[in-house]
Amino acid sequence: MIATLLFVAFLGLMFVGVPIGAALGLAGAAAIALANADSQWFGLLAVPQNFYAGLGKYPLLAIPMFVLVGSIFDRSGVALRLVNFAVSIVGRGPGMLPLVAIAVAMFLGGISGSGPANAAAVGGVMIAAMSRAGYPPSFSASVVGAAAATDILIPPSVAFIIYSVLVPGASVPALFAAGMVPGILAGVALIVPAVWMARKHKMGALEATMPRPPFWKSLREATWGLAAPVLILGGMRAGWFTPTEAAVVAVFYGLFVGMVIHRTITVRDLFPILRESGELSAVILIVVSLAGIFAYSLSTLGVIDPVANAIVNSGLGEYGVLALLIVLLITVGMFLDGISIFLIFVPLLLPIMQHYHWDPVWFGVILTLKVALGQFTPPLAVNLMVSCRIAGVRMESTVRWVGWMLFAMFLVMVAVIAFPQLALWLPAQMGY
């Protein structure tokens, strides 16, 4: 009865417009109070304890830093220089600017690990350039929103950090390595329909007439941006610093590039950068801490084991259960953001993963692929919201374009399910 009330209260609060973090915390606190009706005040002591416990984890220190890195590189002019370098390589022609947008978003994913931040950085440069070349704004917004979704797969990734906190046996370095190959495959899969649609519908008619940047000059200007992922990921692999320390190194590197090399960031710009990243980090971390109350109420009410047993004993078999989970998460992903999905569903899915002896790192990649799909699946698609705002279009106008890219990334997820070594080969080679 109380367990049913927990979910009814959570969904009811969501439908009346309460923010998801508050809905998680209030529903969890109400369930804890009802479960300890004879000693409510003592029972409610679990609320502040679990609020702190949800937040007091060392890997979570990396999140504010990587969010700050995204804000710094957004303003440093690195995205524009990377775009010019990519155009100098692939040239001009129908479908080339969408290809460049996806390639640059994948590369910036190796710096910030935040999809919305990347959508803002790439969209600020590419949507205007694609409009000048004759691409419809709704198509440009679809390409940028989908491309930015690869960021949570390509390390560093905020989603992988959250998952590593929730799942024992899945370290952050192993998850970072596991996401690399699927992330690249997802980017390549997005390029195919983007270029095909551009050529089929004869978009970008003016692109061939636009000048091609000189290669060597573009390479020289993009060098500092190109070196960032090498420093961050290479430093972690060499053992110079942990993922959390890597985030701090990336912040100082980004400030050096923006303030000293490109001089696009001044001392006066630091306050809005810090304020913007602080607000976004606070939202993420408050949701994480309030979800700790919800997760505690799930475990103490004995909800997790019955749900897991019902799914395992449903007669669907291993792959049937996996298909059921994918359908469930795709549906949920249309309405919730990725971090919330992890915080709500990973505690429920953990016993199922253990029952079937699924590798926790592989399962984390599968869940993150699903979250990546959700980031540009209408009606609630955080990356698509950002790119649509920049392009000045309604999200409904992107559906005809974004559907093909959703299908392409879905095929990558199916491939990783069918061939787990796509995710597990690189961590094994790196010794994780």
Image (cartoon, grey):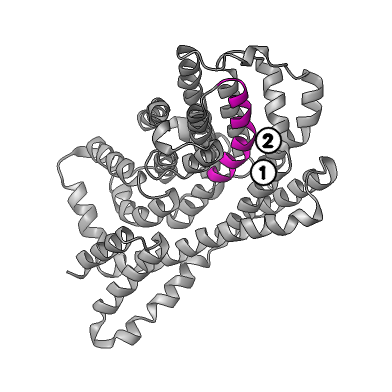
| Nearer to us in this view, 258 or 123 | 123
How far from the left and from the top, in percent, is residue 324? 25, 40
The three-letter amino acid code for the residue at tag 1 is Asp
Q: Quadrant of residue 279?
A: bottom right
Residue 8 in sight here? yes
Residue pointed to by mark 1: 74
Counting labels gives 2
| Nearer to us in this view, 322 or 207 | 207
Residue 124 in the magenta stretch? The answer is yes
Q: Is residue 89 left or right of residue 330?
A: right
The residue located at (62%, 24%) in the rendering is: 132
How far from the left and from the top, in percent, is residue 39? 28, 87
Residue pointed to by mark 2: 79
Residue 92 in the magenta stretch? The answer is no
Q: Is residue 264 left or right of residue 55?
A: right
Q: Give SS at disc 1.
A: helix
The residue located at (61%, 15%) in the rendering is: 206
| Magenta region, residue range | 114-134
Position of residue 162 relative to residue 56, above or below, is: above
